[in-house]
Image (spheres, rainbow, N blue to C red):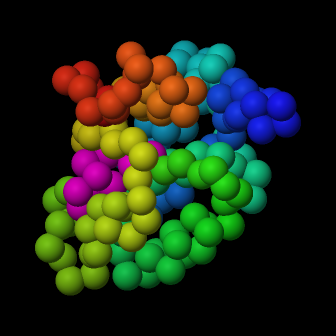
Amino acid sequence: MLKQLIKKSRISSPWLVHFNSGACNACDIEVVDTLTPRFDLERFGVLLKATPRHADILVCSGPVTRQTRDRLIRIYQQMPEPRFVVAVGSCACTGGVFHGCYSVHGGVDAVIPVDAYIPGCPVRPDAIIDGVVKLLGKIRGDTEACPLQSNSKAI
């Protein structure tokens, strides 16, 4: 009973923390834009938190660099279970234009497991919202929202 209540509250009001792991800030601006009244991600109950200890979803943008690798792992470990990771932007998904650089490990999935990929350069705010809603559907167990690989902009 208590586990069902926690799962329901996690789905109806997920908290996310945003981490830039070495991006050019274009995707960061779009992530912040999803929280503005024009796109209003908060209508789904999603709140941006400042600390990973309170977050359910980690939103990463940018490729993982040597400088941010250990910090990303530490932030991921500080999040309570169950925790979910969303890679926002081409750089976070695959390493993007920085793939193969001497100081880049690659996408976020090279360091921590990723639950949802939202490609684009930069990602549109409606694609970010679609990706987060599909992730929430996956958490809920909806068959329509799973798998996250589809032909839409946000996968």
> What residue is shown at x 28% (from left), y 75% (from top)?
105
The residue positioned 44% from the left and 36% from the top of the image is 30
Q: Is residue 66 above or below residue 24?
A: below
**Total count of labels:** 0
The span shown in magenta is 86-95
Which residue is more in the foreground, 122 or 9? 9
Percent x, y for residue 146? 37, 27
Relative to 132, say whether 88 is above or below: below
Res. 100 in view: yes
Residue 150 lies within the magenta run: no
The answer to whether residue 125 is left or right of residue 139 is left
Q: Position of residue 6 (x, y in %)?
A: 78, 36
Q: Nearer the viewer, residue 93 or 144?
A: 144
**106 lies above or below 88:** below
Estimate the x, y position of residue 39 in percent, counting from the top left.
53, 19
Depth check: give the residue in front, 93 or 6.
Answer: 6
Nearer to us in this view, 112 or 90: 112
Q: Can residue 33 be spotted in the picture?
A: no
Query: Is 90 covered by the magenta stretch?
Result: yes
Provide residue 117's location: percent of width, then percent of height.
Answer: 34, 43
Q: Quadrant of the C terminus?
A: top left
Q: Quadrant of the N terminus?
A: top right
Q: Residue at x 68, y 67 (%)?
A: 78
Q: Residue at x 39, y 42 (%)?
A: 116
Task: Give the farthest residue toward the front.
Answer: 1
Q: Quadrant of residue 139?
A: top right
Relative to 122, does residue 45 appear above or below in the rendering? Answer: above
Which quadrant of the structure image shows residue 5? top right
